[in-house]
Each structure stands twice: as C-alpha cells, then as structure tokens.
Amino acid sequence: MRNRFAANADERLDKLIADNTNLSRKRARSLIQRGGARVDGMVRTFPGHPVPAGALVELRTGAAPKKPKGGPGLVERWRGEGLVVVDKPSGLPSQPVRGGRAQHVYGMVSAAEGYAGLHHRLDRPASGLLLLTIEAGRNGTVAGWFQTGAVQRCYRVMVVGDPGENGIWEGVLDGRPARTRFVREATDGRMSALWVRLETGRTHQIRRHADAAGFPIVGDRRHGGAAGRLWPRLALHAAELRFPAEDGGTHTVRAPLPADLRALFAKVSAAGSAGDPEDPREAPAAPDALVS
C-alpha cells in the first residue's frame, strides 16, 4: 500500500485515500479516525476533511486509537498548534466527578494523547465543543486567552417563550458580574431557538440567566422548572469556538446539532434540521451580530 502521495485534486480525505491505495472507503475512514493520516504533516481524524490538490498525504497503518473503547465517544473537530477541540456528547462529564468512576472528557483525551489540559467546561447535560491543550507548553497562552476574552464561545439554545430579536442578560452570579448576549434564530411564539455568546464564564451562566429572565431552557431539570420536562435532555449545545491562531488569524471550529436535539430545533425552524450531524462544514455559523 502506498504510504504517502500527493493529492491530485481537491477532495475529502477518505475518498483520496481510497482512490490512491488498496483500502476501501470504509477502511480509510477507520484509519483516519485512529489518527493514522496526516495532511501536510498534520494529523487529521475527520474522514471528510477537505484536502487541496497538491497536499501531501501520509498514512500510518499501525496508528493507535485516538479514544478509549467503551462509553460515549468523542468526535474530534479540530487539531493543531498543541491543541485539540472535541465535541462532547450530552451526559458525559467534562472532568472527574464525585466518586471518580464515570468516564469524562479530560480522562479520555489524557489517555489518548498522554497529556491534556482542560481550560473550560461544559455542564454534563450539555453538548458541544471543548478546547483542550495536548502540549503542556501551551497552557499559559490558552489560560491567557480565556482571561482576556480572546476565546469566543457561542451556543445554540432552545428556550420557552420569546425573549425578542436580540438582547443581553446581565447581573451578578456567585458574587461576580456576569454577561450573556443572545440573538434569536427562530421562534414559533411558544419556544425560541437562540444563538448565545458567553462574555463571562460563571457556573451554569446561560441556564441561570435564561431562567432569571423568564425564558428557561428547554430540558433544564436543574434551573428550568416545568421547562425541564419538555425534552429528554438540556437543549444547550456549544456550537462554535473562535480562538487565536499562531499566524495572527483566528481559528473557527463548529459542531452541528447532535441527533438528540435536531428534532426539537426542527419544531421551531426548518433550518434546525439542516446539515449532516457528522459534518461540521454543514453547521451554521453564529450570526455576525453575536460575534462582531
């Protein structure tokens, strides 16, 4: 089997490997997900990663798995510069929990990479993007990003009622100022799909702000009262992360709505059901009014 080749056309990674080796498309996807493919020297674990013509593709057939077996899986959405961004499923803790027996994102990434640094968290019932360091030397830089607000965290949320076209929820949480910005994506009057951006990072901030404003999050059994019984899981998904790149630009990583939220968002807007849940290129971008 060819272990390295140049892409002869713009194409997704799994198809290029299948076209240029004796691997089937299915085996190519498996190889990629195990961390066995590099594009221009960078490991790529998303089978649909777009590869430009002329890029060098290198394969390692003996690559170790990038995630431990058992429990909820982690989808890797981005990797580079000593960092990795993973897509956490609902129900999986971000970090060790009381008792220490449950699987968690920090432990899974640590086991796969040999090292992980966790700089922010998602509530256990939430889903979506988490940024971790996989090189200890990057910890100081990433910690500084979060302290200065250089990391933009945008979420898709379903709330009861209609809070309006856009607005800001702010106040004091846990004795510290807290600020949350939202833009309405769609509404049917009874529920509203929102894009939400955290401008501070307090515990359960979006959930507490939404409830205090009179628009509890659907499926929030801790803060939402009756809204907690409207859907089997918390309707809060970390859909977009923006953070500085080494070349001075900005990396933008997106995660489509997971399957267990797509039907809920489709109730309010047909756009809620659009996009392949396995393909971040199909995920909608956060509105400009939220991130500008």
Image (tube, rainbow, N blue to C red):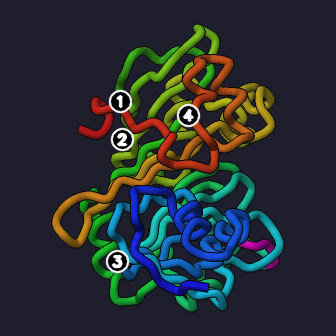
Could you tell which of marks 2 and 1 lies nearer the N-terminus? Answer: 1
Q: Secondary structure at mark 4?
A: strand
Query: How packed is label 2: few (under 14 Cα within 10 Å), some, or many (20 or more)?
Result: some
Check residue 168 in the rendering and tell me which mark sits there, or answer none. 1
Residue position marked by numbered label 4 in the rendering: 157
Could you tell which of marks 1 and 3 lies nearer the N-terminus? Answer: 3
Residues at discs 4 and 1 in contact (Cβ within 8 Å)? no
Q: Nearer the viewer, residue 268 or 93?
A: 268
Could you tell which of marks 3 and 4 lies nearer the N-terminus? Answer: 3
Residues at discs 3 and 2 in contact (Cβ within 8 Å)? no
Left or right: 77 in relation to 26: left
Residue position marked by numbered label 2 in the rendering: 179
Q: At label 4, which amino acid type do we have?
A: Val
CA distance for labels 2 and 4: 16 Å
Residues at discs 2 and 1 in contact (Cβ within 8 Å)? yes
- Looking at the rendered image, the quarter that the C terminus falls into is top left
Could you tell which of marks 2 and 4 lies nearer the N-terminus? Answer: 4
Residue 266, image quadrant: top right
Residue position marked by numbered label 3 in the rendering: 81
